[in-house]
Image (cartoon, coloured by chain):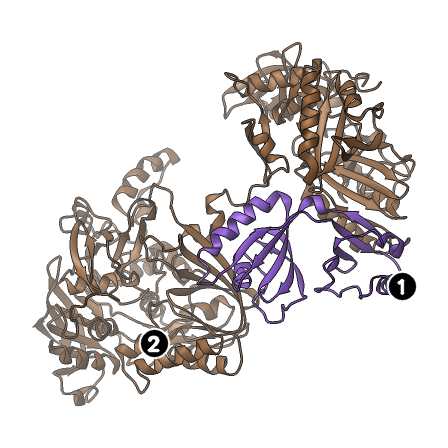
Amino acid sequence: MTGPSRPNTDQDSSFIFDGMRYPARKGDTLAAALLANGIGLVGRSFKYHRPRGIMTAGVEEPNALVTVGEGGRTEPNTRATDVFVYDGLVARSQNRWPNLSLDFGAIFGLAGPVFSAGFYYKTFFGSAKRWMFYEHFIRKAAGLGNAPRDADPDRFSQRAAFCDVLVVGAGPAGIEAALEASEAGKRVILVEQDEIIGASLIRDPQEQDSAWVSESADRIRAAGGRILTRTTASGYWEHDLVTLTQRLAEPGQIPANGVAQRLWHVRAGQVILATGSSERPMAFPHNDRPGVMLSQAVRTYVRRFGVCPGQRVVIATNNDDAYLTAHALREAGAQIVAILDARPAPAGQANGFTTFNNAHPLSTKGSRHCLKSVSGLVDGVSKSWDADLLAVSGGFTPVVHLHCQAGGSLEWNDAAQAFVPAQSRQNVKTIGGAATPAAIFTSAPVVPAKKSFVDFQNDVTLADVDLAWAEGYRSVEHLKRYTTLGMATDQGKTSNMGALARLAEKQGVAIPEAGLTTFRPPYTPVTMGLFAGAAAKDAGAHKRRLALYDVHAAKKPIWQPLGYWFRPRAYPMTGENLAEAAMREARSVRTAVGMTDVSTLAKFEVSGPDAVTLLETVCATSVGKLAIGRGRYTFMLREDGFVFDDGTVWRIDENRYLLTSSTGGADRMATHLSYVRNYLHPELSVSVVNVQEHHAGIAIAGPRAKSVLAKLIGEEPPRHMSTVATKIADVAVLILAASYSGERAFEIYVDARNATPVWGACETAVVAEGGCLYGLEAMEFLRIEKGHLVVGAEIDGRMTPHDLALDKMLNKAGGFIGSAGLTRPALSEAGRRQLVGLEAVEGSIPEGSMLVTADGKSPEGHVSASAFRILEGGSIALGQLADGFLRHGEELIATSPTRGQRARVRVVAPHFYDSAGERYRD
Amino acid sequence: MTEVTISTLPAAPLWAFEIWRNPDAVATRFAAAMGFALPKMGTSGGSDALRLIRYEPTVWLLEGDASALPSILDTDGALTAIGGGITRVLLSGTGWRRLLMEGGVFDAESPAFAVGCSASTIIDHVNIRLHVQSEESCLAYVPLSYTQGILHFWQEAAKALD
């Protein structure tokens, strides 16, 4: 099958298909190389496991799906027509066992009548358990390639681009448009999914030749334009945002710079679509054999790749374009046995071939690997020809996907029997073959519907369309879902129009009245890694590092993700597990002293003469009476009256305050403050600056914290809820006396760049007092035992100040955000869930468990956080319970059926330790 | 191959300079005292000793010696230290514009983003402020916690800039 213009070159390479090594030529697609090596059987069909070959030469290929690459670079379901051979490419056929030639799954083809449209729906009903049983066998028998088990070793890039004109498609029309725009001084991007631009001119030489293509590309680049090959415009979004997927390496290939693919986000002033059209197959029995190809694809293989896919060729057509294929094949030395032209005479007769008018293909015969004969109807009379290739052309379907994704409408072109772009909703226009497809002759040949495939990828035949109609499926959308027509990797690029025509015929309406399914992105399959981009390797986002990260890392802590932050969860000593380490650390805080990193807390400096006004708008507690150097606990409400964050507010100067709030809510609080400052109260003389990262924070807590701090600062430490500006290790610090642990405690804030020496001095002093570092786990034990709240657990967006027993702290003057919302009667009604403490009567209390009065009863609350008493032992928890304030002393069951855990609990006050707060006051 | 060098600069005093009242009067006092005007939105101004980048309608990022500014602001604005939370990263070489398009949403390749321009944008989900120093260098102000992540991101992206 080697064509005349396929000389060997010194750039030849080799590839492996199903374990056999074959030669290839530079520039070959895998499909071209397979054809050049005489391989006709490339895959097995989805449902019936019918032998399939190569049908097209582009991304619309429904048959020749292969798995390319090895290990983590494995890419299943790759179209052999859309991967360019590189030296060492490894490809495997799919959906067959034990091998492609002898596939036991082909038995499903014998039972084809059973596996008609809707087979699953009609067969696999009953309980869900049954489906779990069926599913195992269905997935084994039907399907495409297997996803790789190994992680992809390559990276994926995402890049933004802006341009005045984006041209999609680098055929002659696209190249001309890009050239004109770029030389008019516009920023231009020209994208082409092929490896080269102007490829259609190789297939169909025109006045513009390869020299014109090369010169045009040079001129576009010289004018500042950018040309991206192996790049597909995969999605068109609002505001002329177009996403491009660019292959920097072929599937399975090791990328030169580590980046396999790039996702471009292009914001274009104007988009020009020169996307051309796809050729349509014809429906007739056994139209899916290896050796039945689309006419233009045959021409492409002959002229571009120097591969002649057959020597005795029958051509079936309803248009003039197929005669170009006949000429190309004859030039390549093939014999044109017959041309079946659906049009009446004298159409096509002048081309000098054996042409039959009023002729249609009727069936084919052949082996698993190749075609042997073609039969047809000529003026109603059956004829047959020996042939190893049948080239068909059923007309052309404009590629209108991007136009439709952009919200554009379509109109019916009767001459071409195709939908073409009409109104555009965005700044986009379609040019070239996609706007003006060639005219075809319409006829509706009467052929048997069985084994007349319309959707080759999903094994949907005319008989399936007829069955769906007979069973009442009238909408094209229902037809699609019932038969699976137009699904999977090709998304119906070759099938939709054929099926639509059949549906319209059944309905007795014109095709446009039958409707059309929706074109959704992506145009061709996009690997998931590309959507994740660089973050594919890092859980979706960058890790946020503490300013003291290196200090902690040297101590080899157990790290804990907290939002995007990573914080030490515990600092285990040799032989300790997490629970042991955390309990040791917590006991140190209760009995001596401990220190921890609190840098991630949200922090805002609020300054100006109107600072109090702003703070009393945001905070639900009063602020105005704070003296300089004093602070207090505060919390913030949403407009609906529910608590959404809490923290402290400190007056650090006459008109300057420091507001702290939770780590997890930091970004939300920054947005909220910006909203209040800039939208609700732009008139205020106030500045709100996010200083979360400017200050590193160190907390020292425990009965010996005061003496530790006194030694560090050389003076009497501030009393509880007071602040002082001083120095530690000769570095300026701000010390806030506040406690989260329930012990006497201090938070030390320092310019993050100077935090290391301060941390070092504090650690030395803490250790000297018999203390240690503690992490998040110990902090959680401490705060639960003390009954302090945390955002995300007790403050979960559903609790009012009253539910959390914070109502006595509300600013009686009102005026804060949420004060109006709080007056709603529903927020005062009985039955609301309220904060309670829980202590175990029997067992350990599972965190997140439901609170029920007895097994089988509906939940009346849940456990928001659980821990153990630090010194005395015993399981304790905080929870939310309906009418919880009135139920102290009641016994309940805390149950977690999904984990098989339960405990008997007693409802108590949510303070298990020093409820009077005596330990943190001097 | 497009070239770009990524280097972290030493820490510098950085401030948020905000005017909440009488902006014209403050601008006049500022120009009189400092010898240059407060830069407009999307631009920077000043000298190596004191540079201001306007990134919000009423807020400038100020780099350098701010000792004279409280008296200029008087009661019409505030100065707040923010330098502890920001790393300055210098992108130099012909490829800095293309590098900023990686994971970006902002048109750093636009000729309008010229020397003296500034921008506050998002790069790979991280808020970053940019200041074009010259045709071959751009200064990026990166949040401290994201510095390691962004440096790694840029270093990897720089290998495949094309």
Q: Which mark is on residue B36?
A: none
Residue A463, compared with residue A844, is above or below; it is below
Which hue is chain A drawn in?
Answer: brown
Q: Amino acid at mark 2?
A: Gly
The chain drawn in purple is: B
Quarter where residue A782 is shown = top right
Residue denoted by label 1? B25
Dot 1 alpha-carbon crowd within 10 angstroms: few under 14, some 14 to 19, many 20 or more: few
Residue denoted by label 2? A198
Do we see residue A358 in this rendering? no
Quarter where residue A312 is shown = bottom left
Parent chain of label 1: B
Parent chain of label 2: A
Query: Which sits in the foreground, A148 or B144?
Result: B144
**Residue A810 horizontal/vertical position (percent):** 85, 34
Q: Amino acid at mark 1?
A: Ala
**Residue A406 horizontal/vertical position (percent):** 51, 68
Residue A563, compared with residue A782, is above or below; it is below
Query: Which sits in the foreground, A346 or A85?
Result: A85
**Residue A637 horizontal/vertical position (percent):** 77, 40
